[in-house]
Image (spheres, rainbow, N blue to C red):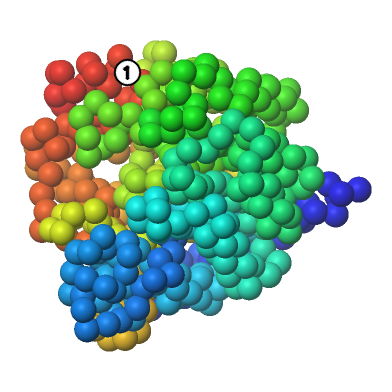
Amino acid sequence: AMEARVAVVCLCFSSLFAFIPNASAFTAALHRKSVGGRAAGQFWHITDLHLDPTYHLTKDPTKVCFSSMGRPAKHAGPYGDYLCDSPYNLIQSALTFMKDAKVQPSFMIWTGDSPPHVPVPKLSTKIVIDILHNMTQTIQQYFKDLQVFPTLGNHDYWPQDQLPVNVSEVYNAAADMWKQWLTSNARRTLQKGGFYTQVFNCNVTQQTLRIISLNTNLYYGPNKVTEGILDPAGQFAWLEDTLKRAQQNKERVYLIAHVPLGYLPDSMSTTAIREKDNERLLQILCKYSDVIDGQFFGHTHKDSIMVLLDNHGYPINSLFVAPAVTPQRRTLNGVTNNPGLRLYKYDTNDYTLLDFWQYYLNLTEANEEKRPDWKLEYIMTEAYGIKDVQPESLYDLTNQFIGLHSKKFQMYYDHYFVNYNISVRCVGLCKVKQICAIKYLDHAAYTNCILRGIE
């Protein structure tokens, strides 16, 4: 009875009349009720909110926010600063834009990280839970009846990164505050290990969509609690069992998590999670790739794609890393991202992913004009001239990136930072790391790609 009461049944058909200020060139594209002739639904993806409750405008730029770590936030305005995590105004502006957009989303995925980047002594378990509760309530206020599928990030714990393998105060608090969205069975595993699965019910198609919310923080390098454990919280076994049952029941699966699989595009030979756990996770996901229609992540704050290949080098899964709402950068003069939001399009018959619309806020302009003008940054299929976002299309696109003066690759790199600075060029080793990270998620193939370079 509880399962039936909590599960949300929604109308999947929806209009694609998105409200896009100053983006008239894209109006015709958005005024379609289908994508490629297929009936399309949509869902939002929001990630890495990183609220900094200390953010305030003051004459001393070193005192604007704790998250600047004493660095001077000289360009602070009502919607933030590139050296700070998100002020509440910025998060509210994002949710306002999403709410006012003329779309009817089927659901939302929220892939973690609500607290700010501050030293451990500045936070506590209570503060982390309070911030997580604040963000949960804020989303619920803007989207009272929308099904949300959340996942925990490495900062959604205290001390940060140390998410445990059993019951904890944070897991219990999350299960309680997310009871509007999650079934009792989902909340039970959330309490035990920070992960869950739940079916999304839709009255347009008989095809079942299963959401799997994975706690990849258990495999995160800085997590000392799980070091040396072969299967932290039994999540590998649980994932394989869940995917096996989904396969037997002919369900489709969306996998959501905070820390992504594969290699970090900015680093050399560095996996986002521990390498051994990355290899094991890849084995499981390759084995059940036929039921997985999409994998969605956050954590890096950047906009990137990956393509999972089978043992024969054939593309079998599309992976998407969405950019953060927070614009915070770690170094004084480094490159960071503008705040971003994403809307995915899917086939309402079988949940096949068709496209996505990436939105962004030019933070500098928003502060100067004292108005948050969220805009369409790009439509994936139209920007890159591909028919959809299926693995074959993304793999073919990545091969087009290889050309010496590939305009599509430079556009991809501009999008990587959410148009923060389009004068930054990525050539040589920078480009090799980006392309190898897209095409090769396992150690052997990635290492071979780096050694031989792009051809």
Q: Identify which residue, 277 or 304, lies in the foreground.
A: 277
Count of picture labels: 1
**Left or right, 390 with reference to 144:** left
Q: Secondary structure at mark 1?
A: helix
Picture quarter with the C terminus: top left
Q: Residue at x 80, y 54 (%)?
A: 6
x, y percentage for residue 331? Answer: 18, 54
Measuring 35% from the left and 53% from the top, which residue is drawn there? 119
Amino acid type of the residue tagged 1 in the rendering: His
Q: Which residue is mark 1?
A: 443
Residue 209, quarter of the rendered image = top right
Can you say whether 305 is above or below 121 in the image? above
* Res. 446 visible in picture: yes
Residue 85, x across and y down, in percent: 35, 63
Up the image or down, 453 lies above or below 154; here it is: above
> Quick check: 42 left or right of 176?
left
Q: Residue furthest front?
A: 121
Q: Is residue 39 something one can see in this rendering?
A: no
Q: Identify the residue at horizontal 16%, vertical 26% (top origin).
A: 454
Q: Is residue 41 left or right of residue 297?
A: right
Nearer to me, 313 or 274: 274
Q: Is residue 7 left or right of residue 375?
A: right
Q: Is residue 198 above or below residue 377?
A: above
Specify the quadrant of the image occupied by residue 20.
bottom left
Residue 211 place in picture, x, y as percent: 64, 41
Residue 180: percent from left, percent from top: 73, 59
Q: Nearer the viewer, residue 160 or 2?
A: 160
Camera-nearest residue between 431 and 144: 144
Crowding around mark 1 (Cα neighbors within 10 Å: few <14, some 14 to 19, many 20+) is some
- Relative to 112, residue 368 above or below: below
